[in-house]
């Protein structure tokens, strides 16, 4: 598609008169074939989508580029894990263009000083850090070290911002009482857990002067902190997802597996004002990234 193109007898021409033509979509937050992590193995679940099936669905919906996650587990080489994910994509085949974010769960000196520069040289310019999940979260000091290296390399740090200790505290108390239905997901992951971690992450970003993307923002308390940082011209960006624009906690209240279909992290929220505020954030530019966080398991 273009202006002044020359058509030959072999050229296929599609008449788009009266139609809207848009570029292919870019989904910057996609999890496919992530069965290798200890978190998945311990829970006994597997990815519902392979690279093959996931990118096929993406193409069918008009998304022509996906950014996947190459996940490092503790004790593993980050560089080797990225290599394995490249091999996985080559084996399964991708219908879409793709790239990788590097998930860092063990930021050792070797990873930060040797492997990360090599990955940046190869074109991977984003890392993801977790402030929650026992097998994935890193300490505040480790976050600062990773952000320092990211700044040196010109990388962006993606952050899953939820207070891991707070979430674990509520989760353990709920499980001890046998309260494990899907609706309790929202209780175990309260808005305060996200807002506190967002504030902490942005504080670290500001101190280190490192570009940061807060992913899957779900509550207005987080947006208040993000907007304040943006108004001060901090290098802070935000992402939200369709579920936080369209769905509420009432879906988690459905019986049995019907409710389980709506489980995500952070969870769907109960206050309609959160949905209203996120829509407002889309309109006013608080959110510069809109992604799926496609991450189905079975």
Image (cartoon, rainbow, N blue to C red):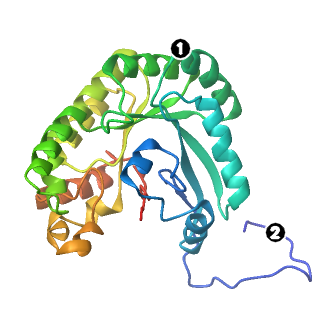
How would you rate the neighbour count of disc 1 (Cα within 10 Å): few for under 14, some for 14-19, many for 20 or more? few
Q: Are marks 2 and 1 in contact (CB under 8 Å)?
A: no
Residue under numbered circle 2:
5
Figure check: 171 above or below 114? below
Q: CA distance from mark 2 to mark 1?
A: 53 Å
- For image coordinates 42% across by 62% down, the residue present is 296
Judge left or right: residue 46 versus residue 251. Answer: right
Judge left or right: residue 74 versus residue 134. Answer: right
Query: Looking at the picture, how far across and down is residue 285, in whole percent?
Result: 34, 47
> SS at mark 2?
loop
Q: Earlier in the sequence, mark 2 or mark 1?
A: 2
Query: Looking at the picture, how far across and down is residue 159, in whole percent?
Result: 38, 36
Please identify the quarter of the rendering in which residue 120 is found. Answer: top right
Query: Looking at the picture, how far across and down is residue 47, in whole percent?
Result: 48, 59
Q: Nearer the viewer, residue 278 or 256?
A: 256
Query: Looking at the picture, how far across and down is residue 89, in whole percent?
Result: 67, 54
Residue under numbered circle 1:
109
> SS at mark 1?
helix
């Amino acid at each position: 598609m273009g202006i002044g193109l020359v058509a030959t007898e072999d050229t296929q021409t599609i008449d788009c008169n009266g139609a809207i033509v848009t570029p292919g979509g870019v989904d910057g937050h996609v999890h496919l074939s992530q069965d290798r992590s200890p978190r998945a193995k311990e829970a006994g679940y597997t990815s519902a989508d392979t690279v093959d099936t996931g990118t096929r669905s993406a193409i069918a919906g008009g998304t022509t580029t996906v950014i996947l996650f190459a996940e490092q587990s503790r004790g593993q080489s980050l560089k080797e894990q990225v290599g394995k994910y490249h091999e996985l994509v080559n084996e399964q085949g991708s219908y879409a263009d793709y790239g990788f974010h590097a998930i860092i769960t063990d930021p050792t000196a070797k990873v930060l000083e040797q492997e990360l520069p090599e990955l940046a040289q190869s074109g991977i310019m984003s890392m993801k850090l977790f402030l929650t999940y026992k097998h994935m979260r890193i300490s505040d000091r480790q976050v600062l070290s990773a952000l320092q290296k990211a700044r040196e390399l010109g990388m962006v740090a993606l952050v899953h911002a939820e207070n891991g200790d707070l979430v674990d505290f509520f989760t353990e108390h709920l499980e001890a009482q046998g309260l494990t239905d899907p609706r309790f997901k929202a209780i175990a992951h309260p808005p305060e857990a996200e807002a506190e971690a967002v504030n902490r992450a942005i504080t670290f970003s500001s101190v280190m002067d490192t570009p940061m993307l807060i992913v899957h923002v779900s509550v207005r308390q987080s947006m208040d902190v993000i907007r304040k940082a943006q108004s001060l011209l901090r290098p802070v960006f935000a992402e939200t997802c369709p579920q936080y624009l369209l769905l509420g906690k009432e879906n988690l209240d459905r019986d049995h597996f019907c409710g389980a279909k709506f489980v995500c992290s952070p969870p769907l929220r109960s206050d309609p004002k959160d949905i209203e505020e996120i829509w407002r954030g889309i309109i006013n530019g608080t959110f510069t990234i809109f992604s799926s966080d496609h991450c189905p398991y079975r």
